């Protein structure tokens, strides 16, 4: 066991094929269990870190300031059955630079790009009771097309739990390609926080918003997820757009996901506002491009509801398309916002109520570019000679159709 060390617990740099198993560390400042550069095929198994602390750092290893219980810079290492039990910053963090750092402190591209290397196993791990995040994975690109073609192993989190972490349960930051399988996330402001990350698969993932057990101890300030400003609780927070459009818009695929405990009553004990299962960020209006184009696919018995009227009336999103497929993956049509623009040229569109319409067949989309937006009106004509006026003139200030 390691107790109250001056810095870190067990750190591996430039070393491979080491197994670190069944250790206990308490109140250690900095990166407690850490794997640095030029280190691969190491295994951290059945270790415990509790009450990890952040610390003041220099420029050489700034991540000690986050106080993560488990951290690694080289992806091809294995974390199995570890428990991160509370601390100032993070339970687990993987931070991949675009080159390896040598003993001299310089980065060398000749040693390879960690973002293009195999990810090792990450399974049966638990993170709870952190002031910031339970688990975070940054700057991984194992899922880009070139790496997929080479068979590079992508990030897979299996049988993990993240709960009672104030900001988020799991955060994916600037990445490409990740799978969460048999995962439980509970009692965090944002269960899965996605920042500029694409191609994510969720399989048998359970999100619990704000459970009665955690609300029961919320009177103790250390356990409060929310302060008096009462932020909302979300299961998944997705980005407005993707970072690498040239890689395709894969978005997020849900396979048998489950959501509970999002309908709690706001009160003095909770200190949080009831949120929703999904928080889809929109592009800032200042960019003149208020939209959300992050693909979301549901497979299996997912019980979800999309509120078209809320999107249209409260958020100004009036061009929602929800594609539908049969059991064989064949497109059967779409549910769209019940407006003339969304139903143009479609035969057999039927109003469903609640601002929705069902349209058979394929829904097509397109983009156009014009240099004189102040005096431009869009008129679309199909092969049968039928024409439809889409909106009106474009407001040069807001970018909206008038």
Image: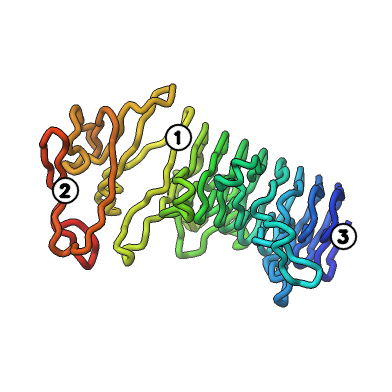
Where is residue 270 shown, x and y percent of the image?
A: 51, 54
Q: Earlier in the sequence, mark 1 or mark 2?
A: 1
Compared with 167, 251 (above or below) is above
Res 298 label: 1
Image quadrant where one finds the C terminus: bottom left
Q: Quadrant of residue 362?
A: top left
According to the image, label 2 marks what residue? 390
Tell us which disc is closer to us: 3 or 1.
Answer: 1
Furthest residue in direction bottom, as rendered = 58
Mark 3 to mark 1 CA distance (whole Å): 45 Å
Q: Residue at x 30, y 33 (%)?
A: 334
Q: Residue at x 18, y 43 (%)?
A: 341
Mark 3 to mark 2 CA distance (whole Å): 68 Å
How crowded pointer 1 is (Cα within 10 Å; few <14, some 14-19, many 20+) is rated as some
Does 390 sit left or right of 188 as displayed? Answer: left
According to the image, label 3 marks what residue? 2
Does 237 sit left or right of 187 as displayed? Answer: left
Camera-side residue of 199 and 262: 199
Camera-side residue of 108 and 284: 108
- Callout 3 secondary element: strand
The coloring applied to the image is rainbow
């Amino acid at each position: 066991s390691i107790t109250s060390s001056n810095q870190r617990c067990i750190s591996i740099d430039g070393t491979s094929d080491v197994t670190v198993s069944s250790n206990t560390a308490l109140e250690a400042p900095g990166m407690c269990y850490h794997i640095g550069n030029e280190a691969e095929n190491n295994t951290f198994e059945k270790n415990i870190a509790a009450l990890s602390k952040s610390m003041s750092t220099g420029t050489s290893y700034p991540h000690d300031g986050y106080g993560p219980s488990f951290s690694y810079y080289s992806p091809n290492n294995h974390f199995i059955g570890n428990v991160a039990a509370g601390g100032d910053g993070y339970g687990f963090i993987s931070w991949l630079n675009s080159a390896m750092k040598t003993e001299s402190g310089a980065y060398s591209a000749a040693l390879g790009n960690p973002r293009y290397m195999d990810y090792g196993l990450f399974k049966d791990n638990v993170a709870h009771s952190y002031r910031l995040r339970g688990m975070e994975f940054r700057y991984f690109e194992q899922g880009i097309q070139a790496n997929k073609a080479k068979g590079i192993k992508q990030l897979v989190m299996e049988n993990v739990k993240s709960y009672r972490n104030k900001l988020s349960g799991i955060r994916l930051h600037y990445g490409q390609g990740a799978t969460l399988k048999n995962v439980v996330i509970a009692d965090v402001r944002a269960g899965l926080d996605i920042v500029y990350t694409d191609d994510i698969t969720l399989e048998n993932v359970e999100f619990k918003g704000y459970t009665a057990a955690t609300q029961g101890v919320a009177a103790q300030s250390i356990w409060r997820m929310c302060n008096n400003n009462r932020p909302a609780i979300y299961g998944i927070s997705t980005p407005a757009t993707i970072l690498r459009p040239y890689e395709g818009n894969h978005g997020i695929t849900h396979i048998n996901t489950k959501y509970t405990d999002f309908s709690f009553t706001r009160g003095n004990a909770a200190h949080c506002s009831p949120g929703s299962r999904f928080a889809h960020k929109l592009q800032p209006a200042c960019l003149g491009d208020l939209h959300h184009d992050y693909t979301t696919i549901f497979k299996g018995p997912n019980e979800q509801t999309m509120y078209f009227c809320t999107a249209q009336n409260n958020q100004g999103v009036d061009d929602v398309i929800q594609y539908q497929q049969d059991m064989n993956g064949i497109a059967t049509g779409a549910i769209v916002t019940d407006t003339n623009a969304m139903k143009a040229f479609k035969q057999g569109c039927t109003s469903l109520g609640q601002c929705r319409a069902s349209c058979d067949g394929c829904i097509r989309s397109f983009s156009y570019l014009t240099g004189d937006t102040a005096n431009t009106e869009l008129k679309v004509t199909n092969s049968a000679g039928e024409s439809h006026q889409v909106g009106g003139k474009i407001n040069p200030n807001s970018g909206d159709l008038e």
